[in-house]
Image (cartoon, helix red, strand yellow):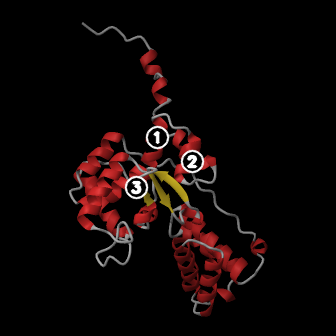
């Protein structure tokens, strides 16, 4: 794409999109251009329709990936090329609502118990204890940990928003133990060069290994620890308003999904099978 790639990259930066979103959007438009072997500047309504149909019917990609492609192309044509996207009149697909996986408190303990490396255990315990996204945890600095107020400052979270979240006592204990052994200077969880944060792929590998060693069969990912944080707080009696702000959600509807995951209210409901009179056992 050359010139258009640089122009779109600059537009994304000016709109303050996160580095992760910038990479995804640029990759989506690049794949769109490669599909037709033409500059996207020469393409329009028919090609966009054909490409999205190809993703859905031939590639069978998840609806989330189609939505990303839709958003990237919309941004490219509307912002970078300054074309009227409404003129394309392309319907946006619906995303089915899926409930996230949640680990029980016993499974979380088993997961941490399976991790022998102190640094790796400290990272995953911090993600769970503070309800962090993986990128937020890896971009923490020593100055973000406030042991006096028992808070963690999250800078440039999703949507480039800052917030404070919890610093649990057990979390502080393991971070102090970790600091005594590794002596990080700037980034709390740095890579071996000590100049950059640890990579997300390295943390994912640690998580999946611990998941196997703990014998947990659920389809969990690192982000599952954040879902588990919110669900366990709700079950312990924390209200949704405080959970929303700890997670950094703008819309309370996003946080309300944890009502569907919590066992707190479900345990008050009796199964209709248990309401039936048991038949007499045959003699």
Q: Which of marks 1 and 3 is nearer the N terminus?
A: 3
Question: In this view of the protein, which residue sits in the foreground, 120 or 77?
Answer: 120
Look at mark 1 in the image and give the residue it sits on.
233
Look at mark 2 in the image and give the residue it sits on.
244
Question: In this view of the protein, which residue sits in the foreground, 95 or 195?
Answer: 195
- Point out the image quarter for the C terminus: top left
Q: Which residue appears at 43% of the width and 20% of the height?
A: 273
Question: In this view of the protein, which residue sits in the foreground, 252 or 216?
Answer: 252
Mark 1 surroundings within 10 Å by alpha-carbon count, few (fewer than 14), some (14 through 19), many (20 or more): some
Rendering coords of residue 104 (x, y %): 36, 41
Q: In which quarter of the image is residue 106?
A: top left
Rendering coords of residue 14 (x, y %): 65, 79
Figure check: 276 above or below 72: above
Q: Earlier in the sequence, mark 3 or mark 2?
A: 3
Rendering coords of residue 258 (x, y %): 52, 43
- Point out the image quarter for the N terminus: bottom right
Q: Which of marks 2 and 1 is nearer the N terminus?
A: 1
Q: Which residue appears at 67% of the width and 75% of the height?
A: 75
In the picture provided, is 23 more to the left or to the right than 203?
Answer: right
Rendering coords of residue 133 (x, y %): 46, 59
Q: In which quarter of the image is residue 84?
A: bottom right
Look at mark 3 in the image and give the residue it sits on.
127
Q: How far apart are marks 1 and 3 (CA)?
A: 14 Å
In the picture provided, is 90 more to the left or to the right than 238?
Answer: right
């Amino acid at each position: 794409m050359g010139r258009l790639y640089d122009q779109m990259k600059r537009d994304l930066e000016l709109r303050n999109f996160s580095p992760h979103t910038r990479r995804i959007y640029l990759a989506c438009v690049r794949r769109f251009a490669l599909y037709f072997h033409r500059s996207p500047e020469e393409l329009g309504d028919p090609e966009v329709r054909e490409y999205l149909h190809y993703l859905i019917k031939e590639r069978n990609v998840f609806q989330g990936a189609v939505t990303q492609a839709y958003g990237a192309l919309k941004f490219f044509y509307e912002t970078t090329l300054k074309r009227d996207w409404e003129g394309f009149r392309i319907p946006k697909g619906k995303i089915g609502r899926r409930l996230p996986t949640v680990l029980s408190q016993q499974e979380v303990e088993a997961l941490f118990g399976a991790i022998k490396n102190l640094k790796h255990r400290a990272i995953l315990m911090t993600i769970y204890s503070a309800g962090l996204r993986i990128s937020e945890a890896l971009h923490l600095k020593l100055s973000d940990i406030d042991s006096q107020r028992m808070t963690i400052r999250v800078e440039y979270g999703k949507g480039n928003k800052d917030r404070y979240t919890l610093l649990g006592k057990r979390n502080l204990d393991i971070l102090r133990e970790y600091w005594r052994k590794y002596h990080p200077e700037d980034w709390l969880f740095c890579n071996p060069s000590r100049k950059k944060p640890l990579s997300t792929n390295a943390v994912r590998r640690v998580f999946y290994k611990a998941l196997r060693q703990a014998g947990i069969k659920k389809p969990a990912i690192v982000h599952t620890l954040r879902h588990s944080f919110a669900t366990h707080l709700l079950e312990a009696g924390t209200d949704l308003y405080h959970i929303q702000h700890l997670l950094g959600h703008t819309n309370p509807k996003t946080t309300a999904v944890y009502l569907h995951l919590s066992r707190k209210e479900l345990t008050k409901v009796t199964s209709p099978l248990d309401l039936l009179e048991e038949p007499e056992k045959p003699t």
